[in-house]
């Protein structure tokens, strides 16, 4: 075990007030593509840029094209939690981890057993009718031909935050509280380029900020420990 992993293990064992803030890189080891890496969705060629397709305006104006992309790239079947998800659930069960704050929409933290999960950008597992509010599971969206429609005739929308939409204010407030009160903040698998979510780490007031990422993040974070590597591979060693 190298020095960085040893230090991370010491930090984790020495605290019972840890908060984890994660992004797409937490789930790539489960087979879910991220957005901004060399092989990510934003590097792939589409008729319209992916960042445009996952916007509210595109969803409203071109629903057929939106749902084609959504089914093909965001509804990934057969996925399982990886070592990162399992370790975080274990740390929560041990009373060390207070909350997982995630930018991901895949539900893998809950599948691994985590209970206090704040989904900043919603979840593909929840879908609702825009007229009557009835909720549907992911299978309904996956199996419905074309634009999914509720029994009442309303369009069924994935409960995810698209570009141009606001984050849930209650989730945002809870995330700010957890981060501001944390002793240890672990930031992992995120480029910290999507706001307002990325700005949440500015509320951290502690002195044990840990960054785990495959590529370097901005230098002004002032992290106390930086580990370059896959999130599951790193957390699986502590």
Image (tube, grey):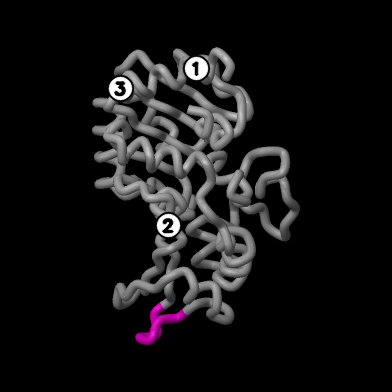
- Identify the residue shown where x is 27% and y is 26%: 16
What residue is disc 2 on? Answer: 123
In the rendered image, residue 43, in percent from the top left (x then y), is placed at 71, 45
Mark earlier in primary sequence (1, 3): 1
Count residues near mark 1 (Cα–Cα under 10 Å), then give few for <14, some for 14-19, many for 20+. few
SS for callout 3: loop
Q: Using the rendered view, name the quadrant where residue 25 is placed.
A: top right
Mark earlier in primary sequence (2, 1): 1
Q: Are marks 1 and 3 in contact (CB under 8 Å)?
A: no
- Identify the residue shown where x is 30% and y is 18%: 205
Residue 192 visible in this rendered orientation of the protein:
no
Q: Is residue 201 above or below residue 31?
A: above
Relative to residue 149, is residue 171 drawn left or right? left
Q: Main secondary structure of the magenta part?
A: loop
Mark earlier in primary sequence (2, 3): 3
What residue is disc 3 on? Answer: 15
Q: Read off the magenta span.
A: 149-154
Q: Is residue 46 above or below residue 174?
A: below
In the rendered image, residue 185, in percent from the top left (x then y), is placed at 37, 25
Q: Using the rendered view, name the quadrant where residue 158 is placed.
A: bottom left
Residues 6 and 43: in front is 6
Residues 236 and 42: in front is 236
SS for callout 1: helix
Q: Is residue 220 above or below residue 126?
A: above
Q: Which mark is residue 6?
A: 1
How far apart are labels 2 and 1 at the CA level? 34 Å
Relative to residue 204, is residue 47 drawn left or right? right
């Amino acid at each position: 075990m190298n020095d960085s992993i040893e230090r991370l293990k010491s930090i984790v064992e020495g605290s019972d007030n840890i908060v984890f803030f994660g992004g797409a890189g937490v789930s790539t080891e489960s087979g879910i593509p991220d957005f901004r890496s060399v092989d990510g969705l934003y590097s792939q060629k589409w008729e319209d840029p992916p960042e445009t397709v996952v916007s509210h305006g595109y969803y409203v104006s071109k629903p057929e094209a939106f749902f084609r992309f959504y089914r093909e790239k965001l509804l990934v079947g057969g996925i399982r939690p990886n070592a990162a998800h399992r370790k975080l659930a274990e740390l929560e069960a041990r009373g060390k981890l207070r909350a997982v704050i995630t930018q991901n929409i895949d539900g893998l933290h809950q599948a691994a057993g985590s209970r206090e999960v704040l989904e900043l950008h919603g979840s593909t597992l929840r879908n609702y009718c825009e007229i009557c509010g009835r909720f549907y599971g992911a299978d309904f969206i996956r199996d419905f031909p074309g634009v999914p429609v509720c029994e009442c005739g309303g369009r069924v929308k994935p409960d995810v935050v698209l570009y141009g939409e606001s984050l849930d204010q209650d989730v945002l407030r809870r995330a700010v509280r957890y981060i501001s009160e944390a002793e240890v903040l672990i930031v992992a698998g995120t480029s910290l380029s999507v706001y307002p979510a990325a700005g949440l780490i500015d509320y951290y007031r502690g002195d044990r900020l840990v960054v785990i990422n495959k590529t370097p993040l901005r230098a002004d974070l002032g992290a106390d420990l930086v580990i370059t590597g896959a999130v599951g591979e790193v957390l699986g060693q502590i």
